[in-house]
Image (cartoon, rainbow, N blue to C red):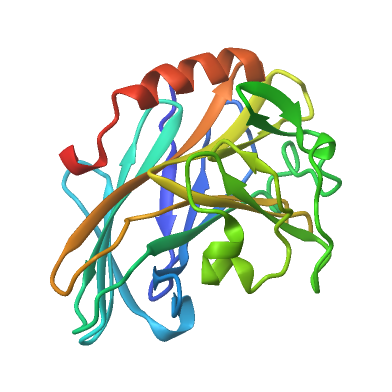
Amino acid sequence: MAKIELHPVKGAMEVHLTNVPGFKGDTFEAKFPESIGPTNKSRWFDTIQCTWDEKEDGNWLGHGWVEDEIDYTIDLQIGEDYVDFIIKLTNMSNEKWSETHAFNCFSNRYAPSVRDIEGKRHWVATGGELKRLIEIPRVFGPRPALQLYSVEGAPAGKDIPFVAAFESTPEDVAIEGWFAIQARDGKHMVAVVSKPVLYTFQNREYSCIHSSPGFGPLNPGETGSAITRVYFVEASVEEWYKRMTKEFESIDPDTF
């Protein structure tokens, strides 16, 4: 089987994915991370220095930093039908961070076979039940095309400053920490899943989906670990969900 190709963008927190089996001609964008750090004063991509280096095994290692504040690495590992983004975030400041995150954006705007501006082929799960995104309540904030959701077992969006600032999180609604989009052919799908996960985000304008990992509280000098996996599979949503659930039961980001 052809191997997924990664093309990091020099000097940017962005990777393009091509040659994806089952998605001929599609290019996927992973802006990982668009923003990172403590959720009350997260650093955006244009304030962070970053580099990409190819490893001997053909995978890539990213490094980003803000002097005396943030340092992170992002280890990209290519699987047969998925790519892992393993992030380690270190608090380089003198302040305790009560909650931390990475705002990881996976965009399908250059993937015609997947792109779903109307959200009709988006899938989520709540209470263990698979549902189409259009069945889930939403809030139309200042930017109506985007939507954030609280995640089951994680703090509510209103209690996460980065999330609350968007004014686009419905109360009394929580979903599992992943998003999936079924391809137009009904036979393939893409999905993003993180562990640990703090919240989710979806923007119809760019057909982008985010499963944003959280690293918990970090004291000065401490490092937290998380993983975001991007799936490109030939399967029904139900088949993929069973596989993903089983795989993520045994995944421990600290062991990578």
Which quarter of the picture shows residue 23?
Answer: top right
Q: Position of residue 11 (x, y in %)?
A: 38, 76
One can see residue 43 in this view: yes
Farthest left residue in view = 221
Above or below: residue 103 compared with residue 245: below
One can see residue 31 in this view: no
Which residue is found at the position 63% from the left and 15% from the top? Answer: 238
User: Which quarter shows the N terminus?
Assistant: top left
Left or right: residue 192 compared with residue 32: right
Q: Nearer the viewer, residue 33 or 41?
A: 41
* Image mark count: 0
Above or below: residue 13 compared with residue 133: below
Q: Position of residue 214 (x, y in %)?
A: 39, 54
Q: Position of residue 33 (x, y in %)?
A: 44, 63
Which residue is found at the position 54% from the left and 31% from the top? Answer: 232
Which residue is found at the position 25% from the left and 75% from the top? Answer: 96
Q: Nearer the viewer, residue 169 or 56?
A: 169
Which residue is found at the position 25% from the left and 35% from the top? Answer: 252
Which quarter of the picture shows residue 216?
Answer: bottom left
Above or below: residue 222 compared with residue 196: below
Which quarter of the picture shows residue 256?
Answer: top left
Above or below: residue 99 compared with residue 208: below
Left or right: residue 180 compared with residue 80: right
Left or right: residue 250 compared with residue 137: left
